[in-house]
Amino acid sequence: MGDTGRDRRRRRVDTIAVAVASPSTSDEVNLSMLPAMSELQGWADLPDDLLHSVIALLCSFHDLLAFAATSQSWRAAFSSYPCKHTFSALFPPLLLQPDIPWCSPRPSPVPKRLCHVSDLANQVTYQCSQIPHFARMNTPPGPLDGFFFRGSSYGHLILSSKSSCLLVDAFTGVTVSPPQLPAGHGTHICYGALTAPLASPNSHLILSTEVHNLFWRVGDRSWLTRSRHRGALLQIVVFEGKVYGMDFERNIFVVHLSPWVYIQRIAVSLRGPVVRWRLAIAWLVPCTDMLLLVGCEGSLVRAGHTFKVFRLDLSTEPSAWVKVDSLHNRAIFLSTNERSQPLCCMNPERWGGRSNCIYCYVEDCKNWITLDLRHQPLKGNAFSPNGFMLTCRSTTLTPMWVVPSMFSSCL
């Protein structure tokens, strides 16, 4: 007989039991609590303090999600863990691959499709929770026909149609429906991003059209519209508590959300190593204490090509881009689709990764690759010599790096 869900949960418990009884890292479990365990009736009765010590020893999002799925009491202990958001900078994001043929095991009001999720920390691929099916060829019609992918941030996919918008949790499929879009704007939306996790105070969803930016404060009943002389923001990130945006011409802006919404352009010197039109593709990347521009001169990233990295120096007037030769103990994760937000991870050696590298997706081998900024060749699982990363701004789902929403934070 095959494994049952109970068997798998039992193995998770056994694995964590070894961590409790025989800690192998310097961050030891609080062993003073172990004598009291003989009085407990089962693993489900372990006290929260002890379970929190176990959580601190886990080394990947996959392990954390397995811990939370073990039992109701463990899930409650996980929910009360005070520092879940710190994991978003310690573990590699998960590679979401929504390219499995559409199927529906049972009738559903909202058709779903399966996704593969790859975890670099565990070197495993497993099946993700189903996410809504939309904008896919050769599939039955459904209620999400006409919805298109506009962006991803804080563990959510952002979809829109002519008049509606949806926020979909990439791992649970749970959806949030903002108010109807302002008349005449929905057709022209090209990008969307959240400014903070949905549960955070003052979290906003920003949608960009060719000439306007639409703002929805989570929980409000209406949208605000703000215009810019040169068009819309095509990338939005959060850095040191501020919301930054970049437009097609690589101009940089600060987006103020309180006491009222307005967009302020940052004066950036055009002198120095950055030429605005020199990079064919570029991502604005918050990376711990640096706001980076990471780009490549061509739209194809082939073996032997290198990325160029610049840091925005906000201490000068005007601000300036400064070339960065090393990421030091950091790694950056870039998705194929430029609508998906880039992510940064600290100390990747902790989970078997490599510092000073950019992780990206190779279309022909259906897997991730790494590129060392010291001009070493591309490497990865099942990498082929002709592999390349082809960037796009597709309105359908493509492979992307995602941090589960429960671990999202404003870094």
Image: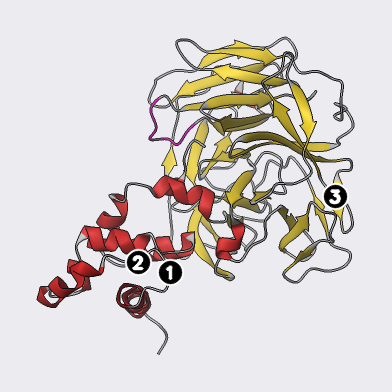
Which of 138 and 298 lies nearest the eye of the viewer? Answer: 298
Is 102 magenta? The answer is: no
Which circle marks residue 28 in the picture? 2
Tell me the residue that label 3 is attached to: 306
Q: Residues within 10 Å of mark 1 (few under 14, many from 20)?
A: few
Which residue is nearer to you in this view: 396 or 4? Answer: 4
Gap in angstroms between the C-alphas marked 3 and 1? 36 Å
Q: Earlier in the sequence, mark 3 or mark 1?
A: 1
Q: Position of residue 183 (x, y in %)?
A: 56, 16
Percent position (x, y) of residue 161? 59, 32
Residue drawn at (78%, 65%) of the image:
379
* Three-letter amino acid code at the position of disc 3: Thr
Q: Main secondary structure of the magenta part?
A: loop
Q: Give the magenta part as a residue range.
A: 196-201
Does the CB distance between marks 1 and 2 fall below 8 Å? yes
Mark in front: 3 vs 2: 2
The residue pinned by badge 1 equals: 25
Q: In the visual, does 153 lie left or right of 191? A: left
Give the CA distance from mark 1 to mark 2.
6 Å
- Which quadrant of the figure contains the N terminus? bottom left
SS at mark 1?
loop
Residue extending furthest toward the bottom: 1
